[in-house]
Image (spheres, rainbow, N blue to C red):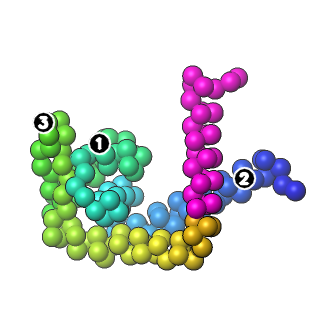
């Protein structure tokens, strides 16, 4: 039987391997990690998002996301519009951006769906349920006010 440390080591290795898959995909597509994830979340959610939603959705700092958004806008892949207030910018893919996403992140989304489709509905549910439980427990353990020294 494995120890908790061995399970943790295996988990960390799998997470790094998973990160590497996405990093390599972005690189092969000629995209920065952040640009990849911006396009990804816009296609995954299939709706216009404001910058703050993108930041929280891809777990990247506001400055990094803002810089990538500006580059994507300068390249003609997206447009920024004023949202409900002056501070929020609505992000919308242009025709060129939709074409880029179709050639890049849509292929990754399709691969992910095929991979999930390789699992039964029960396996998918167990996989996501356990991952959610671990993430919630880890958040609690890493929260300064919850942590027990």
Marked residue nearer the N-terminal end (1 or 3): 1
Marked residue nearer the N-terminal end (1 or 2): 2
Region in magenta: 125-149
Q: Which of marks 1 and 2 is in front?
A: 1
Q: In the image, residue 140 lies at what x, y percent?
A: 59, 33
Label 1 and label 2: CA atoms lie apart by 33 Å
Q: Is residue 147 left or right of residue 38?
A: right
Number of marks present in the image shown? 3
Label 3 and label 2: CA atoms lie apart by 46 Å
Residue at numbered disc 2: 9
Q: Where on the picture, by quarter, is residue 74?
A: bottom left
Kindly check if marks 1 and 2 are in contact, taking CB atoms under 8 A apart as contact.
no
Q: What element carries label 2?
A: helix
Seen from the viewer's position, the closer of residues 15 and 63 is 15
Q: In the image, residue 15 lies at what x, y percent?
A: 60, 57
Tell me the quadrant of the picture where the N terminus can be found: bottom right
Residue at numbered disc 1: 52
Marked residue nearer the N-terminal end (3 or 2): 2
Q: In the image, residue 62 lies at what x, y percent?
A: 32, 41
Q: Is mark 3 on a helix, strand or loop?
A: loop
């Amino acid at each position: 039987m494995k120890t908790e440390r061995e399970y943790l080591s295996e988990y960390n290795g799998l997470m790094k391997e998973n990160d590497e898959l996405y990093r390599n995909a972005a690189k092969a597509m000629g995209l920065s990690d952040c640009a990849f994830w911006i396009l990804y979340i816009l296609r995954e959610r299939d709706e216009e998002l404001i910058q703050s939603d993108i930041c929280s959705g891809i777990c990247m700092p506001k400055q990094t996301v803002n810089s990538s958004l500006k580059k994507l806008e300068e390249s003609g892949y997206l447009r920024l519009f004023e949202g409900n207030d002056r501070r929020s910018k609505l992000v919308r893919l242009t025709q060129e951006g939709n074409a880029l996403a179709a050639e890049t992140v849509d292929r990754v989304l399709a691969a992910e769906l095929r991979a999930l489709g390789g699992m039964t509905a029960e396996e998918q549910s167990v996989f996501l349920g356990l991952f959610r439980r671990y993430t919630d427990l880890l958040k609690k353990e890493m929260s300064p006010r919850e942590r027990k020294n």
